[in-house]
């Protein structure tokens, strides 16, 4: 299987800070994986994502996407080739849902018919009725619906990599479960590589094909949910698992 993203000796320390936001991070992520990134507040999860779309630059080290060093890529083109979903959604308030989703396809020069077909496909994918929602403005949608549109917009130009930073963090528990199930379905259907930041342990273990556990800028463990539960790498990982709700760790089947 191809390698989608590689982090090679990545270090990052913010100006004025006396510790490393990322400390010697080495990772290799395969194409098609849904990697969840889990850790305590301030451990470097968001920084790791923002290095991938070059909102931040590392102090040292190299990041490769599909074999290409991102330092050698034009940052604007790079960002257009990556889907990015954040907790605050970030839809343009003065644009209809249709035009929000069409932003990147328009920049890429798609014709109207191609955009319309893609929109219909995306609405189906995120489970919203095209006719009902396309002409609404973001403020006329619930938080969960907005986040679905955020997801659709990020997927619009068929990016090979999706970065998701706590996308469901502000959604109530019931809708959050639904969105998680939809995300799993979308990932399965798209076979794209997803990097998903969360501080919710249940979410990380439910969604991740592999879970990346971080603490103080360092990778503590990177493995499948089952392997982490069976063999936590150290006390930090063990205590994280212990602190999780019983939902995914103690079930009738005895596992996740
Ligand atoms: N732009 C910045 N300038 C200075 N320090 C920063 C900046 N961005 C992040 N940091 C610091 O780097 C460290 C890692 O931050 P980061 O946002 O990556 O953490 P996180 O794991 O995503 O946390 P959370 O779960 O709370 O969002 C923190 O100590 C944070 O204060």
Image: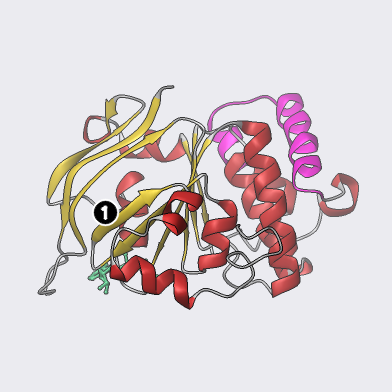
Residue 14 position within the rendered picture, expressed as x and y whole percent measured from the top left: 17, 66
Asked if residue 139 lies in the magenta stretch, the reply is no
The residue positioned 9% from the left and 74% from the top of the image is: 18
Name the quadrant of the N terminus: top left
Residue 140 position within the rendered picture, expressed as x and y whole percent measured from the top left: 78, 67
Q: Nearer the viewer, residue 187 or 51?
A: 187
The residue positioned 87% from the left and 49% from the top of the image is: 129
Q: Is mark 1 within 8 Å of ligand 1?
A: yes
Q: Quadrant of ligand 1?
A: bottom left
The residue positioned 41% from the left and 71% from the top of the image is: 240
Q: Is residue 137 above or below residue 242?
A: above
* Left or right of residue 68: residue 189: right
The residue positioned 44% from the left and 55% from the top of the image is: 230
* Left or right of residue 212: residue 106: right
Residue 163 position within the rendered picture, expressed as x and y whole percent measured from the top left: 47, 48
Q: Quadrant of residue 53?
A: top left
Q: Quadrant of residue 246?
A: bottom right
Q: Is residue 243 above or below residue 65?
A: below
Q: Main secondary structure of the magenta part?
A: helix
Name the quadrant of the C terminus: bottom right
Helix, strand or loop at mark 1: loop
Residue 63 position within the rendered picture, expressed as x and y whole percent measured from the top left: 25, 38
Q: Quadrant of residue 62?
A: top left
Mark 1 crowd level (few <14, some 14–19, many ≥20, 10 Å Cα): some
Q: Which residue is mark 1?
A: 56
Q: How many marks?
A: 1
Coloration of the structure image: secondary structure
Q: Is residue 146 visible?
A: yes
Q: Nearer the viewer, residue 146 or 242?
A: 242
Q: Which residues are magenta?
A: 102-127
* Left or right of residue 216: residue 210: right
């Amino acid at each position: 299987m191809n390698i989608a993203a590689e982090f090679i000796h990545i270090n990052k320390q913010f100006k004025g800070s006396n510790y490393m936001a990322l400390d010697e991070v080495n990772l290799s992520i395969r194409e098609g994986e849904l990697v969840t990134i889990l850790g305590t507040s301030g451990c470097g999860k968001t920084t790791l994502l923002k290095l991938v779309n070059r909102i931040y630059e590392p102090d040292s080290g190299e990041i490769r996407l599909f074999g290409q060093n991102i330092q050698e890529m034009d940052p604007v083109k790079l960002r257009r080739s990556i889907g990015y979903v954040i907790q605050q959604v970030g839809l343009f308030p003065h644009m209809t849902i249709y035009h929000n989703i069409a932003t990147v396809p328009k920049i890429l020069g798609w014709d109207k018919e191609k955009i319309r077909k893609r929109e219909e496909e995306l609405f189906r994918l995120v489970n919203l009725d095209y006719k009902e929602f396309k002409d609404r403005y973001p403020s006329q949608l619930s938080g969960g619906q907005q986040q679905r549109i955020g997801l659709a917009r990020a997927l619009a130009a068929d990016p090979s990599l999706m970065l998701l930073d706590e996308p469901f963090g502000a959604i109530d528990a019931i809708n959050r479960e639904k969105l998680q199930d939809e995300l799993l379905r979308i990932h399965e259907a798209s076979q794209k590589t997803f990097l998903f930041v969360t501080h919710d342990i249940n979410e990380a273990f439910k969604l991740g094909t592999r879970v990346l556990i971080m603490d103080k800028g360092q990778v503590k463990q990177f493995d499948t949910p089952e392997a982490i539960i069976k063999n936590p790498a150290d006390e930090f990982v063990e205590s994280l698992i212990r602190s999780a709700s019983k939902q995914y760790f103690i079930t009738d089947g005895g596992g996740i």
